Image (cartoon, grey):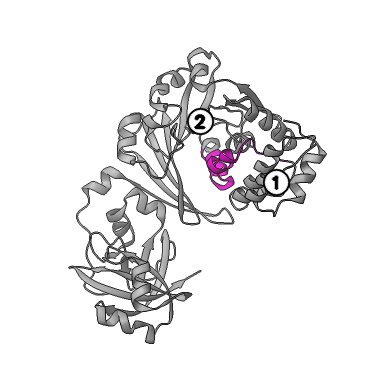
């Protein structure tokens, strides 16, 4: 592919154009690959919020559209670099075995002495070299090779290794189990630990954490990472000299200004806790744990830590008369509690014409509630359709408290 000013001018000129129309249009006599140029425009549309640095720097490029879809966000890449830097000395080296777009490698380079970026596709390596030069990341070294082959022949020692297996099957379907990803990290771990004592594995938010821990064996820590309450990745940290009998799970929610809310628990303690205390009625505040806490399954731990009453075994909502400022999730002030019935639902719009609707442990979906009640979407008030112990269907009208 030819990288020149005409390529950049085409991308800039058509940055708002319809992608399908651009691909159907016949473009002749260009000094660059037109398909590659259109891929740049499509990629930029996809990463505007996820990769603001890449989006705002018009000289950075994308090797493919799928690389922009599958890459880490800048928030999560920065967080991973912070975790690894916090466990190491200032001169650490790290091997990124699945380089891809290079977001993780770049953020590692801001903390590490040396980063080795490994990628099997030559075009990805060429674009990575271009981007790292633009970003003045002079401590990143690029190696065009297959990561599995590299692990079997490598003799160089690294302080850390990082791997993010591709979660697409040969039919381009999404997969998430380690054995279904490419490369199969389970088969690579013994070789990786020969030249690096510590490694971090990125997994899909859909992965079964308990199963993954049993498959990986020497897991020291688990990080469940959300960005603005959307679960993005699960990280498994392995230290072959410091594995934990009780594995801490860090449930992290990263906000837009990169401040973080972190709740830590462990599965062994969660399982040993008695059942949560159930609320007899709704109290002044409603507490909804963030997506990382819910993914981790810290349902009893969160109630124990903050002294909350759970609404019902499967509702995963909590209530208390106290306002708990540092709660890892959303806090709502309860304004109204309505016992659910079909009749009530039909008349609810007379009192509330616009609500943000959420359901938890409830027979109807938000769309079904909206259709039956004729309540419009939006506004400042929330409707939680849920179950209060024992099996009492209720509608909670609440206003979110934002500090």
Instruction: Tell me which residue sits at (57%, 24%) in the image.
Output: 120
Pointer 1: what residue?
Answer: 25
Q: Nearer the viewer, residue 182 or 259?
A: 182
Seen at 30% across and 79% down, the residue is: 345
On the question of residue 283 being in view, the answer is: no
- Category of crowding for the residue at label 1, using alpha-carbon neighbours closer than 10 angstroms: few (below 14), some (14–19), many (at least 20): few
Q: Between marks 2 and 1, how big is the CA–CA gap?
A: 41 Å
- Lower sequence index among marks 2 and 1: 1
Q: Position of residue 296 (x, y in %)?
A: 35, 48
Picture layout, residue 130 above or below residue 22: above
* Residue matched to label 2: 162
Where on the picture, by quarter, is residue 238? top left
Tell how many labels: 2
The part of the chain drawn in magenta is 60-83
Seen from the viewer's position, the closer of residues 333 and 43 is: 43
Q: Is residue 399 above or below residue 180?
A: below
Q: Nearer the viewer, residue 131 or 209?
A: 131
Q: Visible in this render: residue 345?
A: yes
Which element is circle 1 on? Answer: loop
């Amino acid at each position: 592919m030819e990288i020149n000013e005409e390529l950049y001018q085409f991308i800039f000129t058509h940055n708002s154009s319809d992608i399908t129309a651009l691909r159907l249009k016949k473009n002749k006599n260009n000094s660059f690959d037109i398909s590659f140029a259109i891929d740049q425009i499509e990629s930029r549309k996809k990463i505007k919020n996820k990769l603001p640095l890449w989006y705002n720097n018009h000289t950075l490029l994308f090797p493919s559209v799928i690389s922009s879809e599958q890459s880490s966000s800048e928030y999560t890449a920065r967080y991973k670099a912070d975790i690894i830097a916090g466990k190491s000395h200032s001169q650490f080296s790290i091997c990124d075995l699945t380089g891809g777009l290079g977001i993780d490698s770049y953020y590692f380079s801001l903390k590490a002495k040396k980063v080795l970026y490994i990628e099997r596709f030559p075009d990805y390596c060429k674009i990575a070299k271009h981007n790292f030069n633009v970003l003045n990341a002079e401590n990143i070294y690029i190696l065009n090779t297959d990561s599995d082959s590299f692990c079997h022949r490598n003799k160089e020692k690294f302080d850390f290794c990082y791997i993010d297996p591709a979660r697409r099957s040969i039919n381009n379907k999404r997969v998430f189990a380690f054995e279904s990803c490419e490369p199969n990290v389970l088969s690579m771990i013994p070789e990786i630990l020969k030249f690096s004592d510590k490694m971090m594995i990125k997994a899909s938010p859909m992965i079964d954490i308990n199963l993954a821990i049993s498959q990986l064996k020497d897991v020291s820590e688990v990080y469940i990472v959300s960005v603005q309450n959307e679960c993005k990745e699960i990280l498994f940290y392995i230290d072959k000299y410091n594995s934990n009998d009780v594995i801490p799970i860090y449930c992290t929610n990263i906000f837009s200004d990169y401040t973080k809310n972190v709740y830590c628990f462990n599965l062994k303690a969660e399982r040993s806790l008695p059942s949560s205390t159930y609320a007899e009625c709704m109290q002044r505040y409603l507490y909804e744990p963030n997506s990382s806490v819910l993914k981790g399954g810290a349902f009893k731990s969160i109630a124990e830590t903050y002294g909350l009453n759970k609404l019902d075994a499967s509702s995963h909502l909590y209530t208390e008369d106290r306002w708990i400022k540092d709660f890892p999730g959303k806090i709502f002030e309860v304004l109204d509690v309505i016992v659910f019935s079909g009749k009530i639902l039909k008349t609810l719009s007379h009192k509330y014409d616009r609500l943000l609707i959420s359901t938890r442990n409830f027979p109807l979906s938000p769309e079904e509630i909206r259709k039956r009640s004729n309540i419009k979407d939006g506004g400042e008030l929330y409707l939680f359709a849920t179950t209060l112990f024992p099996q009492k269907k209720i509608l909670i009208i609440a206003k979110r408290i934002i500090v």
